[in-house]
Image (tube, rainbow, N blue to C red):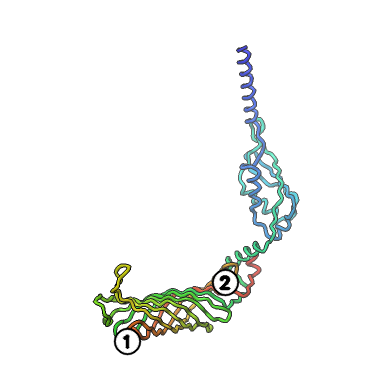
Amino acid sequence: MKKITNLFLILLCALNLQGQVTDSLNQDVAPLGGLNNLAVQYYGIEFTKVQRQTLKNVEVEFIFQVDEFGNPTLSEVNGVTDLAIIDSLKNKTKEIGLFKPSIRNGKPVPAIYFMQLIFPTYQMTKRRYGFLQGQAYNEAKLEDFEYLHESPQRFDMLVGLVANQFVGKPANHLGLGGGMKIEFTGTDKRQILYGLNMSFYANNLKMEYPVNSTREQLSSPTSLLVGAIIGKWFKKFNVQAEFNIAVQNVSEKIGETDPDWIQLDGWSPGLVINYPISLGAGNPRYYYGQPHLLRNHINLHLGIRPIFLSIKEATGVMLELGVCYRMTARGVKSYKLKDEFLQ
């Protein structure tokens, strides 16, 4: 009984080995990575809208000739007669790489491989249309537009350096100074602008303020103005009024609670004229689903600011001159891209 069992196992192993040898000697032609990987290569072709319409709901049959080395050639395409589409399919075939060749009795041989595809169609939803429209707008340059009409509406961000000089009583105590300013404004259809301003200055101390304190005063007292802006654009320049809260640090603050810290507070109206100088052509950009034209400027401005602080020696007028960078996002009322760009 034991001998019969052993013989049965030997025969079973021999049959299994024979089957493995037979499988290794024969192989059907197939794409490396499988059929899905091959199909994806052709789905990735960027057909035109007209070509997509031609392929709509059409079953396309691919007939490949694969040589003994696994090199595929798209010899026939059934279901499509458009030569441009057929050329695109054949050109893509040159990029897909090798197939597993057909093997018969251990020898690679030429073979034929068939594949059928239906190319997907895309419904042009409002969201998708807006996305494609924005993508084309972002890729375009000004010379790619047949026309582009700007809107009065705009958003401006300004940041830069300023020089300031006090006039009146503060000039006895403070010399020429400088600092920086940041400004954000939005402009409506009437070209009325609204925004926020923050300006920071440091001026050389010429003579100490007459305050009741033994604390040493700063060699460069610092002033801060923060407030609101309202104004109007006039073609190439704007005029704006500002209403700011004002503070001026006269001595250093030591710790969180410092009873001897000298800080003057008050308020300051202001009148500022801005003159932006454009830097090159604008850049089309899509923001929040709307077309804009992004422009860069060097901004020159001149300001006069009466300043009212908590002691009369610090109350007077401040003159300001600045050079800043201005970034503007202009609204666009209408535009049309050139046909040759869209193609």
Q: Is residue 227 above or below residue 15?
A: below
- In which quadrant of the rendered view does residue 181 lie? bottom left
Report crowding for label 1: few under 14, some 14 to 19, many 20 or more residues within 10 A (C-alpha): some
Task: Give the SS element for disc 2.
Answer: strand
Residue most extreme to the left: 214
Report crowding for label 2: few under 14, some 14 to 19, many 20 or more residues within 10 A (C-alpha): many
Which residue is painted at 71% across and 48% down in the image?
A: 117
Pick the residue in front: 48 or 66: 48
Q: Gap between marks 1 and 2, in whole Å?
A: 47 Å
**Quick check: 143 left or right of 50?**
left
Which residue is painted at 33% across and 83% down in the image?
A: 311
Residue 256: in sight, yes or no? yes
Tag 1–tag 2 contact (CB < 8 Å): no
Whichever of labels 1 and 2 marks the residue nearer the N terminus, that label is 1
User: For mark 1, what is the residue?
Assistant: 169
- In which quadrant of the rendered view does residue 225 lie? bottom left
Which residue is painted at 52% across and 76% down in the image?
A: 186
Q: Which mark is residue 292?
A: 2
- In which quadrant of the rendered view does residue 103 lie? top right
Q: Mark 1 is on which residue type?
A: Lys
Q: Mark 2 is on which residue type?
A: His
**Quick check: 282 left or right of 199?**
right
Residue 288 image point, x, y percent: 58, 67
Task: Give the SS element for disc 1.
Answer: helix
Pick the residue in front: 164 or 259: 259
**Quick check: 253 left or right of 25?**
left
Q: In which quadrant of the rendered image does the C terminus lie? A: bottom right
Q: In which quadrant of the rendered image does the N terminus lie? A: top right
Pick the residue in front: 338 or 76: 338
Residue 113 image point, x, y percent: 69, 42
